[in-house]
Amino acid sequence: MGKQYESINQKHEKFIAAQKIFFVATAMDKGFINLSPKGMDAFRILNPNEALWLNLTGSGNETAAHLKYDKRMTIMFCAFDGKPIILRLYGEATVYHKRDSFYKNNIRLFPRIPGSRQLIHLKIKMVQTSCGMGVPLMDYKKERLMLESWAEGKGDQGIEEYWSLKNTTSLDGLPTDILDDAK
């Protein structure tokens, strides 16, 4: 049976810190729903009702497009080892690009990761835990370094060119503002 909380407590924070992967979901009232797995050292809890996620360059940029129009976002963590738990953070999120002062002031919370693209700031409205008895047990081996190597090889200019080709609009044609200087 699921339990709801108004904020992240210490038990939740400890569980989140132990996870190697999380999933991000966003949607518009029409069009495709976005659900993306995320890894690496890219998630921070700022306080019991705020979290920050470092969004890295990928083949698309659905989250940024969706959040421009509808700020709803869910982040899910699930245990693949140990006690079976699923934890979801529900809230409203804002995208901050490298040009934004919020990004510049908060990027220091993360290690330098080539291909870093945006910070997503989630204001948490509800935390929900439920059993994860249907989630398989799996062993963590290591982080994949391919994304970092790829981004490092492209360099800053190459990443911006890639963003121009692949990250300026969503699957539904919505703008992401990744290269827009006006915000």
Image: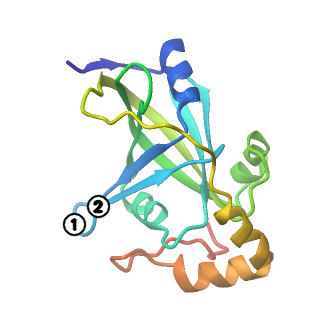
Q: Quadrant of residue 83?
A: top left
Rendering colour mode: rainbow
Q: Which residue is mark 2?
A: 33
> As rendered, which of 41 and 91 lies closer to the eye?
41
Q: Secondary structure at mark 1?
A: loop
Kindly identify the residue that appears in the image at 73 percent across and 67 percent down.
149
Q: Quadrant of residue 1?
A: top left
Q: Secondary structure at mark 2?
A: loop
Amino acid at dot 2: Ile
Amino acid at dot 1: Lys
Q: Quadrant of the C terminus?
A: bottom right
Tell me, for residue 181, which label it has, or none.
none
- Residue 176 horizontal side relative to residue 44, left or right: left
Q: Which residue is mark 1?
A: 30
Q: Position of residue 106 (x, y in %)?
A: 73, 44
Query: Can residue 86 be seen in this snapshot?
Result: yes
Q: Quadrant of residue 161?
A: bottom right
Kindly identify the residue that appears in the image at 53 percent across and 33 percent down.
19
